[in-house]
Structures are given as structure tokens and as C-alpha cells.
Amino acid sequence: MKRCSRLFLAILLLTTVAAAKTAPKMSNADCLACHNDPTLTKDENGKPVSLHVDEAKFKGSVHSVFGCTGCHTDIKAFPHDPPPAKPVCATCHADQQAAYEHGIHAKSAAAGNSNVAKCQDCHGSVHELVPASDPKSKVARANIPQTCGNCHGQNLVMASSGVSSAPFTSYQDSVHGKAVKGGSGAAAVCTDCHGKHDILGAGDPKSPIAKLNVPATCAQCHDSVKQEYMQSTHGQAITRGNWQAPVCTDCHGIHTIKAPNDPKSAVASANVQNTCGSCHASVKLSSEFGVAGGRVSSYLSSYHGMAQKVGSSTVANCASCHGVHNIRPSSDPRSTINHANLAKTCGQCHPGANEKFIAFRVHQDGTAKADFGSKLIAMISKFYIWMIIAVIGGMLVHNLVIFRKKLILHRIGQPRILFRMTLAQRIQHLTLLTSFIVLVLTGFALRYPSSWLAVAFINETVRRIVHRTAGVVLIAVSLYHVWYLLATQDGRQLLKDMLPDWKDVTDARDAFRYYLGYSEQRPLFRRFTYAEKAEYWALIWGVFVMAATGLIAWFKVGIGDRVPGYWVDVALTIHWYEAILATLAIVVWHFYGVIIDPDTYPMNWAWFDGKMSIENYEHEHPLDMLAIEKAAGKQEEAEPLETGQEQGETTASRK
């Protein structure tokens, strides 16, 4: 009985296997009978996923020559139970898959990044995939930048990988990107430089964009340039493994490469000295590799450099003399700056250049070299520096002595008995003036650390202490002034006279009419003119703003704990621009009124001793009758005394 059962099972198994082998495979038509339905979906993680296969597009794809079951090998019949596994591209494309596994995309996916590119992201749907030679293919040469840009041009996608999307944007604006957009089939696209499936990071020595490999990568299109470059001093350094030597991308840019005639290009004529200077102005280059330093600064000191600064488009730059890709040391007979070739090199701009002409030094560094000409130039330079100091210094001292005497004579030339400013007001004014000037100098020293202002304050610590001390003094004198206005009789009168009113508006109108020649009547001012009132209230506003923003900047840590962080940045911005506004207002407005005005020049001495002459005051403030009458009374009292003194002196002289 057992034997019969075993025999029956064996026969049944063999029959089933034979039936499976002889059963026909499902045809593409069988599959498309269902999958050509656009509404066909399946549920995956709670979301509907389309199972639609467009029959027309599939028939036009490279995979149409294969049966569906060639990739979906686990499908035997319908319905598919259990659900079939996703096909693996590596089944047919093992070499490409192996290359992909070595690239940064696969490594990033292995690290848990789900936003990395996979086969279909670059090549498109497997059911619609067309050959790369087809213009509609996502990997057709003209479409590669956009295909890569689908990820690399999206900020949100790249942010998860810690990579910027800027390179893609830069490429689009580059000479390569513009050429591709223009229909060029030869311009470099992403895969030409980065590779296709085995894309490696720049830090990988095997990467085509690793620094030492860049010349070979660019040589795929620019082989003749590479041949020149590899024989140059830069190329030889790269051959020796010196990664600090410049390669193509150091001069031309990486994704931002532009045509040499583009003004924005790093190798445009106007920008060459900056590009070369990024290395040759470096102290490290001269200290570590023995390359002569100061070449950029000495070029800029020469005629060529000065002409280049003012925008000359024809003046010689670094490449004009040293070459472009064929740069060699002057000791090399093939170098364009070798002594034997200098006349020819200079002759490009200076026809007829000869041995005497090339004796002229291009890099005017002003230092003494071994040759007689350099020593002579250095001696002449020193002589003239001391000559300038002595002659101009002597002229300055001479004029200051004369100017001082004339100022004194002008000050005592007219009897000044009318008091314009009291002692308390003069002290406040002088304290305000001094603290303001110190604040301006120390503040601008911070903004321009390489200027003489920064040097004048020794270092940042000294500058900071002086600036803050002056700020405290300014705030203190301002608070005292408020007390002065409220608590003293002179202060209350000052405040009353400083209040603006409608007459100030009409005075301003009449002043413009008079000074522009539309009226013969000069406006009559009271104790303070509309201009003086405007300046006074602007000063109060400026002090308040500068003090508030300055204190925020000073105590930014404590304040930053209580308010949004951008408050400090806003305060610093206001502090800077208010400082510019206040400084220019003092120079343009206040200094004009007290120094430059022809009616006042060379100076209104009221700030010094508080006095003005009656004649000058009547001319400037004819409606301030109280002050004028008071001063006139003093003058009348003084005149008889002066007459008596004169008579006494006359009698004494007669005796």
C-alpha cells in the first residue's frame, strides 16, 4: 500500500513538472492586456502606485525586443500571486551596476540617504527607455545637464545631502552651459568631467575631478592646451605631485567657466592680475616654494598696473608677458621672459623694442637689487622721500605760522563784546565736539582696518576702549544738557529760543529767494536762524539714535538674550549709517556755517571765548534786540573811559 502511494506521488510530481515546462510563457500582449490600462494601480505603503505601461511608448523603447517575462522572470501566470519582485537592472547591465556601486550615489544610499539618483532617475522609465542617440533620451548628450539638474538644481533635494545646488546654476551660465543650450554637440556636459556610472568625489584620487587629474579631464576637449600646460612650470609642478600648483579650474573656474572675452571671466584681461594674484600675492607661496614675492604689488606700482587700475583694455597684464598656458621660468630658453626673448615679447606692444628697451624694469618694487640701475633707483627714491618731507613740511610750518598770526589779528581786529555763548554752553559744546571727533575717528578705524586710522589707534583693544570712553562722555554731556535746559535760566531761555515756529519756514523761503536773486530783502533772523535750529534738533535726534544703537552693540550678549537676534544686526546697521549721516552733516552744514561762510571766514570765535562783534551780530541776528542793546550799552560805557585814557596819555606825552 505504501509503495503504491509513493509511486502515485512520484507520477504526479513528474506530470506537474512536465506540464510547467511545456506551458507557454506569457506574451507581451498578454501583459499589456491589463497593464495598458491607465487606471491600473496597486497599494504600496498606503499609497496607490501606477502599474500602467504605455503600449506605444513601450514598443518604441529599447526593451521592446525582449519579452516582459525576460525581466519579470518570476511571473508564470495570471493573477500574480504572490506579487512579483522588482526586476534588477544588473541582471543584464552588470558592468554598469558594478561601476555605480563604486560611485558617490551608491555610497550615499548605503549611508541612508533616500534622495540619491538610481537607474530610472537618470535613464527614465524602463518601459519607455530609448537609446542615448535618440534626442528624446534623458541621457542624450544635450539633455544630460537638465537630467542632472533634476536633482542637483533643486535646493530641497540637495540640502539633505549637505550639497549646494549652486554648481548647477553656475554651469548653466558658463561657456559650456550656454554652448549646450545653443545646440553644440561638443561642449562639455556633466558626464564629461564627472563620469557616468562611477561618479567619484573630488577628494578621491581616482576621480577625474581630483586636482591632479583635472588637466587630463579637460584634455578630452582641450588636448593642445594640455600639451602646452604640461610643459609649463605649473604643469611640471603638478607632474611632481605638488597639488598647490594651479590647474585649469584654479584659473578658469569650475562650473563658472566663461569665455576669455567675457568681462566676468576670471581670465578676462581686466581680471588676470587678480586671478594670478590669488597665488602670487600669497606669503605662503614665497616662503614654502621659494617663489619671489611681491610680484602683484610691484606690478600694480608700475605704469602697466596703474593703467590697468583705471580701466585700460590694452595695457599689458601678467599673461601678456609670461604667457597663458605655456608659462615657464625666466631661466628656460623657451620662456617668453627669458632675456633672449624679451625684446620680442615687449615688441608685441612696443614695436622696435631692443636690448636697451628691455633694461626697463616692469615690476617697480623700489627695492635695491644687485644691478647698478636698481641701486640708483632706490637711492633716488629715498632722496625724494626725504626731500618731500623736508620741503613740504617746511612749507606747512611756514604757512601755519602765518595763518596763526593772521587768525589772531582777525580775532582782535574788531571789538567783540557781545556774548553769544556762556561759559557753561562753551564747555558743553567743546566736550560734545571732542567726543564726537574721537567717535568718528575710532568708528571709521573699525570699518577700515587697513587705513591710517587703524594704525593711529595702535590696535583693536585701544581703539575699542577709546571709542567706548568717548561714547560714555557723549552720553554724559547730553544728559547734562537736558538738565541744563530744565534747571537753569539760561538753559530754559535757550530751549525757548530753539523751538521752531512758522517764522522759520518763512525765513527759509525768504533766504532762498534772496540768495537766488529773486528778492532784494535779506531775511531778518532772531537769536537762532532756521538753519541753526534744524541742526540743533538733528543733533539731539542723532545723539539719541547713536547712543541707543551703540549700547545695544556694546551689550549685545545680554540684550540678545531678551530680544530676537536680528535686533543687534539692525542696531549695528543703523549705527553705521547714522554715523555717516552725522559726520557728513557736521562737515557739510556746521563747518560751512562757522568756518567756510564768507561772512564768518576764517572762523566764528564764539566757540572759543563766547564773543562776537556787535556789527557782525547785527548782520546775522538783527531781531535779537535784547542782546544787541545790552552789548551796545557796554560799548557806550567803555568808550568814555577809553577817551579819558587817550587824553591822559596825550597829557603825559606832552609833559
Image (cartoon, grey):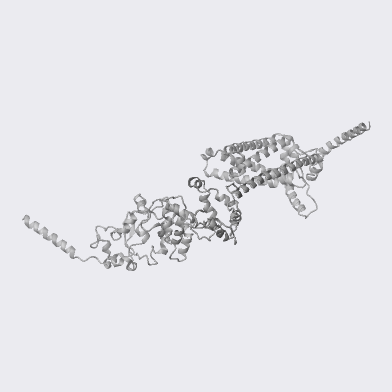
Residue 297 locus on image (x, y percent): 57, 49
Residue 296, percent from left and from top: 55, 51
Q: In which quarter of the image is the N terminus?
A: bottom left
Is residue 525 positioned above or below 332 on the image?
Answer: above
In the image, residue 320 lies at what x, y percent?
A: 54, 58
Q: Farthest left residue? A: 1
Q: Is residue 165 visible?
A: no
Total marks shown come to 0
Q: Is residue 454 visible?
A: yes
Q: Seen in the image, is 152 located left or right of residue 44?
A: right
Of residue 185 and residue 631, the one placed in the foreground of this image is 185
- Image position, residue 442 (x, y; %): 61, 41
Q: In which quarter of the image is residue 5?
A: bottom left
Q: Which residue is drawn at 56% across and 45% down?
A: 570
Q: Which image quarter holds the C terminus?
A: top right
Residue sitting nearer the eye, 437 or 407: 407
Task: Determine whether 518 is above or below 486 in the image.
Answer: below
Horizontal side of 16 relative to 354 (left or right) equals: left
- For this orientation, the residue located farthest to the right is 655
Front residue of this view, candidates 145 and 64: 145
Q: Nearer the viewer, residue 125 or 482?
A: 125
